[in-house]
Amino acid sequence: GKAFLDSDQLSKLSLLANIPVGELFGLNWKSKKVGDILTLTTGTYKAELDTTSWLTKIFDKGSLFHESIIHSGSTPLSQYLFSIDAIIAQHKSNKKSSINNIKAY
């Protein structure tokens, strides 16, 4: 049958299997959990999920560019990671547009 794991269970599975959480879904995320904060990193991006408030902060090169609740206790981790990827893709697109606008001047 099918089963669903919450973020804490997936985090534990990843630690036990010594596999980054993102790799469980074929994504390029590395994870680390300290206390109530699950930190996911890929390239210059970092997402911090507070597992008590469900608040996510997303950083690029250490600079915060997004903060919201995009996860609840019932959101599958795969959906959460895809949501973060979409936010980062939008951020990259916005950065590229800004650079192109500057070059146009």
Image (cartoon, helix red, strand yellow):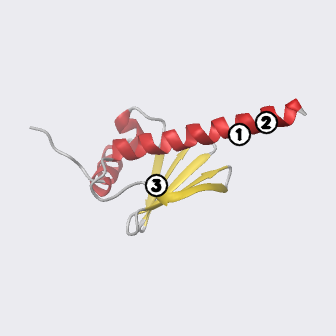
The reply to whether dot 1 and dot 2 touch (C-beta < 8 Å) is yes
Mark number displayed over residue 87 = none
In depth, the one of 28 and 47 nearer the eye is 47
Q: Amino acid at mark 1?
A: Lys
Give the residue pinned by disc 1: 95
Secondary structure under the numbered disc 2 in the rendered image: helix
Q: Residue at x 40, y 36 (%)?
A: 23
Secondary structure under the numbered disc 1 in the rendered image: helix
Give the residue pinned by disc 3: 32
Q: CA distance from mark 1 to mark 3?
A: 27 Å
* Left or right: where 82 falls relative to 59: left
Q: Does the rendering let one see residue 59?
A: yes
Quadrant where the N terminus lies?
top left
Sequence order check, earlier mark of 3 and 2? 3
52 lies above or below 101: below
Q: Amino acid at mark 2?
A: Ile
Secondary structure under the numbered disc 3 in the rendered image: strand
Q: Quadrant of residue 71?
A: bottom left
Q: Does the rendering let one see residue 43?
A: no
Horizontal and vertical percent for residue 15?
A: 35, 50
Horizontal and vertical percent for residue 68?
A: 49, 59
Classify 10 Å Cα crowding around label 1: few (below 14), some (14-19), many (20 and above).
few
Give the residue pinned by disc 2: 99
Classify 10 Å Cα crowding around label 2: few (below 14), some (14-19), many (20 and above).
few
Q: Residue at x 52, y 53 (%)?
A: 47
The reply to whether dot 1 and dot 3 touch (C-beta < 8 Å) is no
95 lies above or below 65: above
In depth, the one of 104 and 96 nearer the eye is 104
Quadrant where the C terminus lies?
top right
* Left or right: where 68 falls relative to 15: right
Q: CA distance from mark 3 to mark 2?
A: 33 Å
Looking at the image, which residue sits at the far left? Answer: 1
